[in-house]
Amino acid sequence: MAAAILPGDVVPVPQSSSQVLRLGPGLVAQEESRVTATHAGLQHASKSNALWLEGRRKRWVGARGARARGSAGRSIGRGGLLLG
């Protein structure tokens, strides 16, 4: 069962001596053995020693190796011209 995590919560880290811990979206390492949440969500862990949070976000957070469909070239301020 996934645990509900809020921003600022210290996330429990699974004990593994030989593998490197991989952190996904919503998590940041503060110290060697301390992981803190930056977003609210449900904590998930994989067998390959990866941790991530799944939650409702309004923006896309790319994963390593993910392909982007498009990119923003330039933007014009509020009074600018919009070409369609």
Image (cartoon, helix red, strand yellow):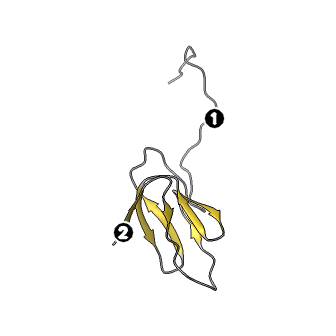
Residue closest to the eye, 61 or 4 = 4
Residue nearer the viewer, 4 or 52: 4
Residue positioned most to the top: 79
Give the farthest residue toward the bottom: 18
Q: Earlier in the sequence, mark 2 or mark 1?
A: 2
Tell me the CA gap for discs 2 and 1: 39 Å
Q: Find the residue positioned furthest to the left.
A: 1
Q: Position of residue 48 (x, y in %)?
A: 53, 79
For the residue pair 30 and 61, the one nearer the viewer reads as: 30
User: What kind of residue is marked 2?
Assistant: Ala
Q: Residue at x 60, y 74 (%)?
A: 21
Q: Residue 64 sits in which quadrant?
A: bottom right
Residue in view at x 37 percent, y 66 percent: 3
Query: Regarding mark 2 in the picture, which secondary structure is present there?
Result: loop
Q: Which residue is mark 2?
A: 2
User: Where is mark 1, residue-wise?
Assistant: 73
Question: Element at badge 1?
Answer: loop
Q: Is residue 72 above or below residue 56?
A: above
Tags 2 and 1 in contact by the CB under 8 Å rule? no
Front of the two marks 2 and 1? 2
Label 1, residues with CA under 10 Å away: few <14, some 14-19, many ≥20: few
Q: Is residue 65 above or below residue 60?
A: below
In the picture, the quarter occupied by the N terminus is bottom left
Depth check: 48 or 71 in front?
A: 48
Q: Mark 1 is on which residue type?
A: Gly
Residue ID at (43%, 65%): 43
- Number of other residues with Cα within 10 Å of mark 2, as a class: few under 14, some 14 to 19, many 20 or more: few
Q: Which mark is residue 43?
A: none
The vertical placement of 42 against 58, above or below, is below
Q: Residue at x 51, y 69 (%)?
A: 51
Residue 26 position within the rendered picture, expressed as x and y whole percent measured from the top left: 51, 56
Whole-percent x and y of residue 4? 37, 61
